[in-house]
Image: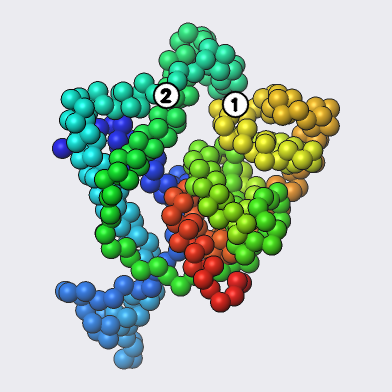
Amino acid sequence: MRPTPVILAALLAASFTAGCNKEKAPAAAQAPAAAQATAGEPTPDTVVATFGDGQKITYKELNERIQEPMANLEKQKFQLRKRGLDGMVTEKLVDAEAKKRGMTQDQFLKAEIDDKVPAPTDEKIKEVFDGAKGQLPPGSTFEQMKPQIVDFLTQQPKQERAQALFGELRKNANVQITLPEPPRPPAERKQVAATGPSKGADNAPITIVEFSDFQCPFCSRANAAVDQVMKEYEGKVKLVFRQFPLDFHKEAQKAAEASLCAGDQGKFWEMHDKLFASQSALQVDSLKSYAGELGLDKAKFDKCLDSGEKAATVKSDMADGQKVGVSGTPAFFINGIMLSGAQPAEEFKTIIDAELKAPAQK
């Protein structure tokens, strides 16, 4: 039995293991300790190379040198197995529920996902079309592009509905995953300045510093996990947002500046949410229209955005991020412990719970 496209899409969206970067590949994860020798492997003191006047390299020394890439490989293997296991479990649960209702899988998924996601209004479709005109092929008409825009506008809601449905099925079936996870590394803590727009308790024991890009789809996707963490750990977590617009996202720089201009009028988080919800329309004219929708002083906002006065702040954020190893987005530092890519809430919670149990926060 092979997963349907709907299940595959939802599982890939739910895996949250990717981010935006120049190489279009996930940023490196933290490395667990060097793998222990397994059956068929040399023992740690086995000599694997000799040279010169009696010099040698042991298998242990080799493993220490390649510790990080080997650990990353183990994590990738685990993630692949976990994704495959999730797909198998979800497929069986969907099949069982469909049979219970006298439906095929496709009929069940259409009834529970497609039919429950409202179609976008013509007004919203037109708004996206107008905002993307400069990026469309010459001569493209509204009627030609409408089906693609509808697909674009409904894709994420359908994925979210699918994830909610599959989560409900798993909860009702009391699914327990016992796949062993590779050992986690000793946490490497980096000094990251928690400067920038923030929310949550100022005296919270946990500070999450997020480096993000408003045009990065993975950053938008990560918001759900961050929101969940902020709700579950209310009073215990402070979130600080720092800018990291990537140069291949052409509208990201001005979007970053727009969020800071809105912040000057006390509406950073409102603009933050608006920008992530409108990633297909981040041109300057659109940014200015969002300021009006949010009730900002348009003259002040437009002057702030047009002058480029926030560019230095954005540049400073990016420099600070690069110093601590940020190369793609989103990147999070939980009390200085790096978490790269759009990760599920469970990854945040594992680090947060360990930090809360620690004798003293660092």
Q: Residues within 10 Å of mark 2 (few under 14, many from 20)?
A: some
Q: Is residue 320 left or right of residue 91?
A: right
Which of the marked residues, 1 or 2, is nearer the chain's N terminus?
Answer: 2
The N terminus lies in which quarter of the figure?
A: top left
Identify which amino acid the numbered label 2 is placed on.
Val
Q: Is residue 344 left or right of residue 75?
A: right
Residue 3: image x %, image y %? 23, 36
Give residue 281's mark: 1
Whether residue 239 is visible to the viewer of this picture, yes or no, is: yes
C-alpha separation, residue under disc 1 versus residue under disc 2? 22 Å
Q: Residue at x 35, y 80 (%)?
A: 61
The residue indicated by pointer 2 is 117
Residue 287: image x %, image y %? 69, 29
Give residue 232's mark: none
- Label 2 sits on a secondary structure element that is loop
Say which of 46 and 190 sits in front. 190
Say which of 58 and 280 sits in front. 280
Q: Residue at x 28, y 55 (%)?
A: 177
Q: Quadrant of residue 160?
A: top left
Identify which amino acid the numbered label 1 is placed on.
Ala
Residue 34: image x %, image y %? 35, 73
Whether residue 87 is visible to the viewer of this picture, yes or no, is: no
Q: Quadrant of residue 154?
A: top left
Q: Is residue 266 above or below residue 351?
A: above
The C terminus lies in which quarter of the figure?
A: bottom right
Q: Residue at x 63, y 53 (%)?
A: 239
Q: Residue furthest bottom?
A: 54
Residue 260: image x %, image y %? 73, 41
What is the basis of the colouring in this image? rainbow
Q: Is residue 101 above or below residue 196?
A: above
Marks 1, 2: nearer the viewer: 2
